[in-house]
Image: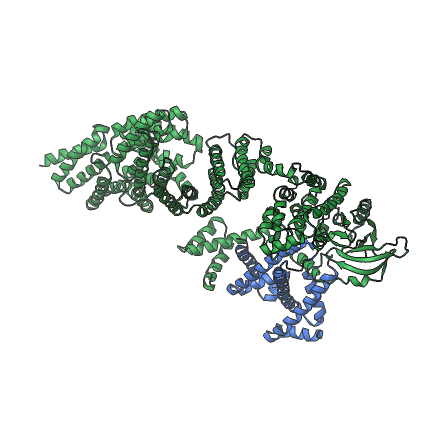
Amino acid sequence: MREKSEITGLLIKIRDGSQEAYEQLFPLVYSELKRLAYGKLQKERDDITYTETALVHEVYLKMVDQTTLNANDKNHFMAIAARCMRQILVDHARKKTAEKRGGDKQDVTYIDELLKARHEAKELIDLDEELAKLAELDERMAQVVTLRFFGQMTVDATADALGVSERTIKRDWAKARGWLYKELKN
Amino acid sequence: MDQQKWKKVNEIVDTALELKGQQRDTFIEKKCKDDEALKSEVTRLLESIEQSGTEGFLENTKDFPGHLAADFSKEEQESASSLVGKTIDQYTITKLIGHGGMGSVFLAERADEAYNRPIALKVMRRGMDTPSNVARFERERNILANLDHPNIARLLDGGVTEAGLPYLVMEYVEGISLLDYCDSKKLNIDKRLSLFKEVCQAVKHAHTNATIHRDLKPSNILVTDEGNVKVLDFGIAKLLEPEDPESTLLQTRTGARMLTLGYAAPEQLESKAITTATDSYTLGILLYELLVGVHPFDMDDKDLTQIEQIIRSKEPSLPSNKFSNLPTETQKKLARKRNTTAAAILKLLSGDLDAIVIKALRKEPESRYSSAEQLLEDLQRREQNLPVIAREDTFRYNSSKFIRRHKTGISVAAGFLLLIIGFTVFYTWQITEERNKARIEAQKAEEVTEFLTRIFEGSNPSVPKSDSIPVRHFLETGVKRINEIEEQPEVKAALMTTMGRVYSNLGQYERSDTLHEEALKLSKKIYKDPHEDLAKSYVMMAVNEKELDNFAAAESLYKKGINILEKLGNRPDSLYSSSLSNLALLYEEIGEHQKAIPFHKKAVALDKKNYPEGHEKIGISLNHLAVAQDKNGNFQKALKNYEKALKILKNQLGNDHQRTAITTHNIAILYRNLGMIDRAMPMMKEALKMKKAIYGNEHIVVVSSLAGMGHLYRETGQIEKSISSFKKTLDIVSNTHGDSSMYSGIMMFSLGATYLQDGSFSKAEQLFRKSIHILERVLGPEGSYLAIPKHMLGKVFLKQEKLSEAQNEFRETKSILIKHYETSHPYYAGLMKSLGRLKIAQDSLQKAHFYLNKSIEVFEQKLPDNHWKLAESRLLFGKVLYHQGNYDESRQLLQQSIPNIQKFRGDDDPYVKSSREILNLISSAE
């Protein structure tokens, strides 16, 4: 992994509006998060309290030198991590649904979990697709959902990361949820 | 949606979210104006926002990562081999034999050599979570250790590893799976059955020791080199389930039952009680595979959701059917493995073995063999050529199962239906060749279900409603049974149509439609030429569509049906004529009276051909025709047909029948419309008398005739009687519908009209206002009925010389009328007359001339020349002409029209009086 200082530097550049820095940082966070996700979840699979929120925080602690950053930078990082998390989970879900019960029959299967995971995988993929459509109509609303849902970020952290008021976030969240609900549940 | 549209929606929604209730609605209304699409987008989004908020959509997200995390873990590669060479308690692990989801199996030996045969050691993948679970594990293990049977691999020992993973020590069995063994040895069906019976013996032993296997599958049933059957892993699935029901987290995490998809019983997927019948099911699958060579369900290339669906609801094909449907090559190959021919296999399977396997595979545990022992016994009966339970049971299962369940009055009829369905299934089984016989059965089914359908028709209040569970359940089961019929599509289609009708009568139109559609699909396949059954399906679907207000769809379906019936020529049944009538009634309902008439005429003609002269059917269809003609303004023709219909109905049904009463009422109304009040009065009185005799004095049906009397009394100047009639109607409707229903609104303005005529303006005004209030609430601000009280209120103002108020009411009346009626409707003429009077009062003679002229034009088209309404307009017009100095025409009009009012309302009527004054003025002026 790269030096903490390097990543922290990228983050500061992003604060100043550098798209290039963003594009450099995203894959770094993505791979670290993924590595951590698989590793962690394997070892501690019975610890159900271990959620992605914790993962994101752990990535942050690992990758960033917090002493040189302010709260706003942290929120920016969290936002990136949320987008990564979305991609990781959706990729995984895609892989899941693509698997058919083919030739090599698994001897024993945890039916409940698998069925459940399949259903949820499908839901997740649908959500991701609708979110992409929403982004075409209203980019910020889609961002709010990504951060709030995949990053489990609070309203004020989301507001801080996106640079708008909490009131706006709340309203966007309500509208975006309504819009997604309309598309997915009806 | 594009971005531009979204911007609009977004903007409106933003503001709307800040508003509440009425304010919000008004705002949306204002913003969207006439853009219905925009409005619907906005409302849908607002609704979804609310709904998603209540449901906490996307907020309860803990589940998501949790389960996906569990899923991640499946990617893990167990490094089980690292245990080889290690020692667990007194066991030394020598070799990894295999591993699956449940854990890893090792070959091991006792380190202390106290037991010197090879043993299998199974290390579970999952921890035991809590001390209480560990304790239970020990307890259960002891029970299993007591299973002592030559066909069961013994459980020797068990414990928990240092890492906290439970392990089990079992007798090591070297062998191959039962299925592979049979194929490799080319065992014939008999030998396969005898090995299978050994499996059953093992399971029976466990069952009598209160142990259920729960996970019987080929890899758990091995045959040793010596040919001994050994069943492995008895009860281990149960052993690993957590006991504590309160720890729900543990249940979702570790309570995953370990199952092999192809061998899981429906109740295992539904988390229902697992019983010995669960093992029967799995034995059934095993037997199926042993005999046929393939799994009963095709699960390859299906995803889990589909498989779940199959296990829960797809009925397996009979083994013999399954086999005969395989490709010839496959059949040959399988036959070789069974050391016989395909034909011989087929013969052997058909009958008893088919029935036994199917009974074992029933979806409902209570319909299967309740334990391995029963299955075993049936197999033995078969060998001894005794009748097997499964065989008898198949018939009973299909026919009488539901009679037992439903003990309401309906069950008798239901039982009949199911018995007959049962019969057809039975025939399918027994004598597929004899189609004719099946046809007779279908007819029988028709008769009985006719009876059943009538029960559901709802005229009988003692019949349970469709939402009562047993009825609904029974119906669904009926449908299911019908779906099982494979050999006689005619029977199937006919029964589906019948069930469709039952559902339609219960108001479940969509369900009914599905059945009709399926019946139609079948019928289309069976009958190349036009066939009555096809027509029947179309017509019944049309009925459903009409009930759902899909008029265009209903129309086209009726036409399809009628088309077929037309091609078939006239037949002595009522389907054709009733379809014609129903289509016509549909037209009337949507206001297309003109279109209705030819169909009614055709129906009348048909009924005349099919029924003897004077039959009630002819009376009924004549009445229908007359109503359409009446509404279409063909009064004379209508009257003639009404009178014919009435004669027939009185003859056939007598006076005390609702149909006779309705036709009598209709005639009275027609006379009234024709201005023949003297004839209308006795007819209406008779209709009222009939209705009272049939329904009693206080019934809602009586109201229309009572109100009819009220109008007639008013029109003949009998004010007291009119008032008391309308007051009575108000009493009745407020008793039956509450005092602010639409009926109350209508009766109020009717009573008000009488007060208005009597000059009691304040009473009239009060009633009109109340009526408007009620009708606006019930029908919305522009409901058609509102035109009447508004118009009348305007008349009150006119009488009180509040001219601008009057004008206001008339204007509102007009805007309502425009919405609902063509300008050639008599209502319009009435309003024009009022406007004419208003203009006279305002001294605007030219405009008065215009309006009254219009009014007369319309009335002349719609009413007979001596109608009092036309007379009123003419008298007013005569007045205008007088003021305009046109004495000749004025006198002519007045003289011609006065008698048409005077004869009903006498010399004191204000119209009569003022007209005579003008006549006097004219003669004195000349």
Asked whether residue A18 is in view, the answer is: no
Is B699 located above or below residue B375 in the figure? Answer: above
In the rendered structure, the answer to whether residue B263 lies left or right of residue B93 reads left
Q: Is residue B764 left or right of residue B26?
A: left
User: Could you say which is closer to the camera, residue B830 or residue B164?
Assistant: B164
Q: Nearer the viewer, residue B509 or B221?
A: B221
Q: Position of residue B595 (x, y in %)?
A: 31, 43
Please tell me the colour of chain B: green
Q: Identify the image's colour scheme: rainbow, by chain, secondary structure or one colour.
A: by chain
Extreme residue in the left direction: B926
B724 relative position to B100: left or right: left
Is residue B492 depicted above or below B455 in this figure? below
Position of the N terminus of chain A, as image quadrant, is bottom right
Query: Which color is chain A depicted in?
Result: blue
Report how many numbered discs are placed on residues in the image: 0
Q: Can residue B664 be seen in this snapshot?
A: yes
- Res. B404 image quadrant: top right
Residue at position x 15%, y 43% from top?
Answer: B884
In screen coordinates, is B223 left or right of A70? right
Where is residue B733 drawn, in percent x and y?
41, 31
x then y, percent, for residue B810: 30, 43
Nearest the viewer among B132 and B145 is B145
Give percent across and percent down for residue A173.
57, 59
